[in-house]
């Protein structure tokens, strides 16, 4: 499971972006968050772990959770 940092959150639109440790950037949707994270309190800079999922628009982050 890759680790990364929340880069940006568009709280009014329900999504954001994570920068993985390898520098890749991944889109995430609020529905892809684990219960360990509250979308409404994300501001960016939080350390997270996530799974890379395939989508019709390319890879995205899913099952996003707070990093241990």
Image (cartoon, rainbow, N blue to C red):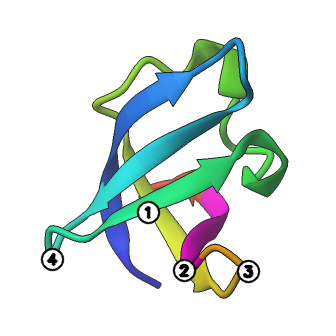
Labels 4 and 2: the sequence-earlier one: 4
Q: Nearer the viewer, mark 3 or mark 4?
A: 3
Determine the main secondary structure of the stretch shown in magenta. Answer: strand
Crowding near the residue tagged with mark 1, few <14, some 14–19, many ≥20 C-alpha atoms within 10 Å: many
Tell me which corner region of the image, top left, top right, bottom left or bottom right, holds residue 22: bottom left
Residue at 69% x, 15% y is 40
Q: Which mark is in front, 4 or 1?
A: 1
- Which residue is disc 2 drawn over? 59
Q: Are marks 1 and 2 in contact (CB under 8 Å)?
A: yes
- Where does the magenta region start and end? 58-64
Q: How many marks?
A: 4
Q: Residue at x 69, y 27 (%)?
A: 39
**Residue bearing mark 1:** 26
**What residue is shown at x 70% (from left), y 12% (from top)?**
12
Q: Which residue corresponds to the image point at 72% horizontal and 23% vertical from the top-left?
A: 13
Magenta-drawn stretch contains 59: yes
Q: Which residue is mark 3?
A: 56
Give coordinates of residue 54: x percent, y percent: 67, 87
For label 3, the SS is loop
Which of discs 2 and 3 lies nearer the camera? The answer is 3
C-alpha span from label 4 to label 2: 14 Å
Q: Characterize the local packing of mark 2: few (<14), some (14-19) or many (20 or more) Cα atoms within 10 angstroms.
A: some
Q: Earlier along the polypeptide chain: callout 3 or callout 4?
A: 4
The verdict on residue 45 being magenta is: no
Which label number is shown at residue 22? 4
| Distance from the alpha carbon under mark 1 to that under mark 2 | 7 Å
């Amino acid at each position: 499971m890759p680790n990364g940092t929340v880069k940006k959150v568009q709280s009014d639109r329900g999504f954001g972006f994570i920068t993985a440790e390898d520098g890749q950037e991944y889109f995430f949707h609020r529905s892809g968050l684990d219960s360990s994270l509250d979308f409404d309190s994300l501001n960016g800079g939080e350390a997270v772990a996530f799974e890379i999922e395939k989508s019709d628009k390319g890879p995205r982050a899913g099952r996003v959770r707070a990093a241990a």
